[in-house]
Amino acid sequence: MNIDNVVKEIKFDEKGLVPVVVQDVNTNKVLMLAYMNEEAIRKTLNEKVAYYYSRSRQELWKKGETSGNIQKLKGFYYDCDKDTILIYVDQIGVACHTGSYTCFFNEVIKNESKDEILEELYSLIKERKSNPKEGSYTNYLFEKGLDKILKKVGEEASEVIIGAKNKNKEELIYEISDLIYHMLVLMVNEEVTIEDIKNELEKRKN
């Protein structure tokens, strides 16, 4: 990759900026819209973490430099008109300064698609770990630690076996769902992403 060539390709506006759509590589959720100048692009591509240009402060800023909610660069694209950038990131913590996982939380019409339910649940569990919520069972598991999480995974796996042996489809669906949830908690706790699992499963297609 030649960064000089990338910068030459990008069409910046009159202020030397280009809009950047930021998407979570694990959940495919759009996290935020920001802006980059030439320096931000260079530092992002060199360091593999996201840098942006703050229009309000009129300065370069590294995402998460003070909060710890950095964005590890996983993909970098620009569109057909070369005037908009799309980056995929591994979001550490939350993306929004409000404490929300994504800046796009003001719902007008709810997305009813169930195609990304695992990614959405993973995202919610990850947010609970970063921003504990009182009374949350998910946070209870994280507070108790790895041994408790592993114990629950083992218990749920046993209940899946019992549900299958009982020849009860509804019971089996319920228990498999319980197991998947606890597996996702384990994944978040051990920093295993859904993308990691997809990549491993991709190897097994043969």
Image (tube, rainbow, N blue to C red):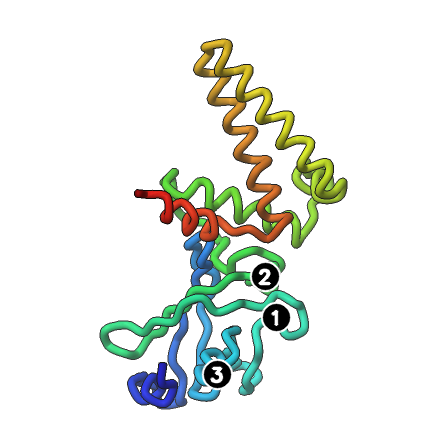
Looking at the image, which is closer to me, 131 or 153? 153
Q: Which residue is mark 2?
A: 92
**Residue depicted at 52% across the width and 15% down the height:** 163
**x and y percent of residue 166 in the render?**
50, 9
Residue type at numbered disc 1 = Gly
40 over 22 or under it: above or below: below
10 Å crowding of disc 1: few (<14), some (14-19), many (20+): some
Q: Secondary structure at mark 1?
A: loop
Structural distance between the alpha carbons of marks 2 and 1:
9 Å
Q: Is residue 92 above or below residue 57?
A: above
Q: Nearer the viewer, mark 2 or mark 1?
A: 2
The residue to which callout 1 is attached is 64
**Rendered location of residue 162, percent (x, y):** 55, 15
Question: Under tag 2, what secondary structure?
Answer: loop
Q: Name the image quarter holding residue 92.
A: bottom right
Q: Residues within 10 Å of mark 2 (few under 14, many from 20)?
A: some
* Residue 157 % position (x, y): 57, 26
Q: Quadrant of the C terminus?
A: top left
Q: Are marks 2 and 1 in contact (CB under 8 Å)?
A: yes
Q: If you read the primary sequence from the N terminus, does the residue marked by circle 3 or circle 2 appear first?
A: 3
**Residue found at x 45% / y 79%:** 45
